[in-house]
Image (spheres, helix red, strand yellow):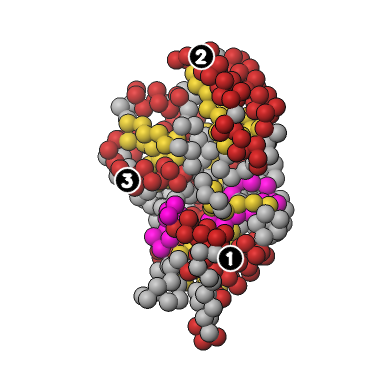
């Protein structure tokens, strides 16, 4: 992680950590790394989720970009993957999404995409950091004739929805589903998208007010959706996060189908149709051990990366794989998208169900999930840094590893987006791993809070 950029862009409490001044300077610096003899006025797309602070940060970014000569096209409230897609469709030079994804409303963030719709590589993020934090080069000040302009793109939602709909050959007719939009970006697109494909939709948490994004809803709070699908006897439910780059599902019994299950179902279907490149799926170190067993049984290769969809994507691009993702619901279908796309994931999964005339609950039996306990321990910023050198925490991790042996594992890591240390313990004995996870979390809390 850099000094500004974490695993998923710049993020912080809006107007406190992520200030207008910082956003403006990030805009200036982002434009300056793209300005050259051939591109004197780069065009930036800007999208945002539904947070109250989105307008404020959008205005600051506009000011920064235009002040150094960049032009801006505003997309309004739209999912993050829509920005990534539309950069290419509109032939822009870069795209910016204002969102803190699954975080509470008081947080916000800035994600930047290059002209090909991929998140910026580390070297460009470091160039931006050097300009913003170190004053490596002074900010440009073009004369009044060369300042940037702003326009509004009115077709952004329709163009994105059409793109996702065109990724499948069949439709979703006959399916009755629930869609939890997390009071976020999917509130603008999900109903149009899924009803346009023929599904009967029950809309949940699709009435954003600026502060209710991710508030006891969406992919980080699945209980309500699970109950709703069960009570209304629906075929499935889909839940997105604040910027709709994640998707978790609920089957016809009201049971959770997380990202690991979605990848397993889709990858095996792709293999059966000769569409899975190199017979390989990419996951992360947090991917459930049951997924590894699933791959062994079904003669699939599994490649593991560090946590973060950017690392999954880097591996996919480098090695030529076409599906990968995270348990949290970031799934990348590289044949159709350059980043995780929650609604695209939902469309692919439901299309598969309809094409095979199958129930999601039946498809999910192809993988058996190992019991897994994840505890998020809130720590100070200083605590996050001390984690790497704390001997007592290292000793505790080693103790748990010795207890688990070959029957499980422990992963303790710093969150790239929040002031948290994440403790994950996995194994065959649910009671045992819960006890070990809580003991480790207590040590982390005592040492770093």
Q: CA distance from mark 1 to mark 2?
A: 49 Å
Q: Find residue 25 and name its label.
A: 1
Q: Is residue 128 magenta?
A: no
For marks 2 and 3 on the same chain, the one whose residue lies earlier in the sequence: 3
- Which percent across, then down, holds residue 250? 56, 36
Taking depth in this image into account, of 214 and 194 the one nearest to the observer is 214
Quadrant of the image for the C terminus?
A: top right
Tell me the residue that label 2 is attached to: 402
Residue at 61% x, 15% y is 431
Above or below, 199 relative to 151: above
Q: Bounds of the magenta span?
A: 101-123
Q: Total marks drawn?
A: 3
For marks 1 and 2 on the same chain, the one whose residue lies earlier in the sequence: 1
Position of 364 compared to 215: left or right? left
Residue at 61% x, 35% y is 386
Position of 243 compared to 197: left or right? right
Within 10 angstroms of label 1, few (less than 14), some, or many (20 or more) residues? Answer: many
Label 2: element kind: helix
Q: Are marks 1 and 2 in contact (CB under 8 Å)?
A: no
Mark 3 or 1: in front is 1
Tell me the residue that label 3 is attached to: 318
Q: Residue 238 is drawn in which quadrant?
A: top right
Taking depth in this image into account, of 145 and 224 the one nearest to the observer is 145
């Amino acid at each position: 992680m850099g000094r500004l950029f974490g695993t998923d862009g710049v993020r912080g409490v809006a107007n406190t950590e992520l200030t207008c001044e910082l956003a403006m300077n990030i805009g200036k610096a982002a434009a300056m790394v793209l300005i050259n003899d051939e591109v004197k006025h780069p065009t930036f797309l800007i999208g945002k989720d539904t947070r109250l602070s989105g307008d404020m940060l959008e205005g600051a970014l506009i000011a920064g970009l235009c002040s150094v000569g960049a032009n801006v096209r505003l997309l309004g409230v739209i999912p993050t993957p829509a920005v990534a897609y539309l950069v290419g469709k509109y032939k822009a030079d870069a795209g910016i999404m204002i969102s803190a994804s699954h975080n509470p409303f008081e947080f916000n963030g800035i994600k930047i995409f290059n002209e090909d719709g991929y998140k910026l590589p580390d070297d460009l993020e470091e160039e931006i950091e050097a300009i913003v934090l170190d004053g490596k080069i002074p900010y440009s000040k073009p004369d009044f004739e060369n300042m940037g302009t702003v326009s509004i793109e009115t077709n952004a939602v329709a163009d994105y929805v059409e793109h996702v709909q065109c990724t499948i050959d069949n439709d979703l007719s006959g399916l009755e589903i629930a869609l939890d939009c997390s009071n976020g970006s999917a509130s603008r697109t999900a109903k149009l998208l899924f009803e346009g494909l023929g599904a009967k939709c029950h809309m949940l948490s699709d009435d954003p007010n600026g502060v209710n994004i991710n508030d006891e809803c969406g992919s980080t709070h699945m209980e309500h959706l699970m109950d709703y699908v069960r009570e209304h006897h629906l075929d499935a439910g889909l839940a997105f996060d604040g910027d709709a780059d994640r998707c978790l599902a609920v089957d016809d019994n009201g049971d959770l189908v997380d990202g690991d299950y979605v990848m397993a179902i889709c990858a095996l279907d792709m293999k059966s149709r000769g569409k899975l490149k190199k017979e390989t799926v990419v996951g992360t170190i947090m991917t459930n051990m049951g997924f590894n067993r699933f791959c062994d049984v079904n003669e699939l290769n599994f490649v593991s990366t560090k946590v973060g969809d950017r690392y999954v994507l880097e591996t996919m691009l480098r090695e030529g794989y076409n599906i990968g993702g995270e348990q949290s619901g970031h799934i990348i279908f590289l044949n159709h998208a350059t980043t995780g796309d929650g609604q695209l994931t939902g469309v692919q999964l439901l299309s598969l169900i309809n094409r095979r005339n199958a129930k999601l609950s039946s498809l999910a039996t192809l993988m058996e999930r190992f019991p897994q306990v994840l505890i998020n321990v809130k720590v100070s910023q200083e605590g996050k840094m001390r984690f790497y050198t704390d001997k007592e925490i290292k000793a505790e991790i080693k103790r748990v590893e010795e207890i688990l042996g070959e029957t499980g594992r422990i992963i303790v890591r710093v969150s790239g987006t929040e002031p948290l240390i994440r403790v994950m313990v996995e194994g065959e004995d649910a009671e045992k791993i819960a006890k070990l996870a809580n003991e480790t979390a207590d040590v982390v809390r005592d040492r770093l809070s």
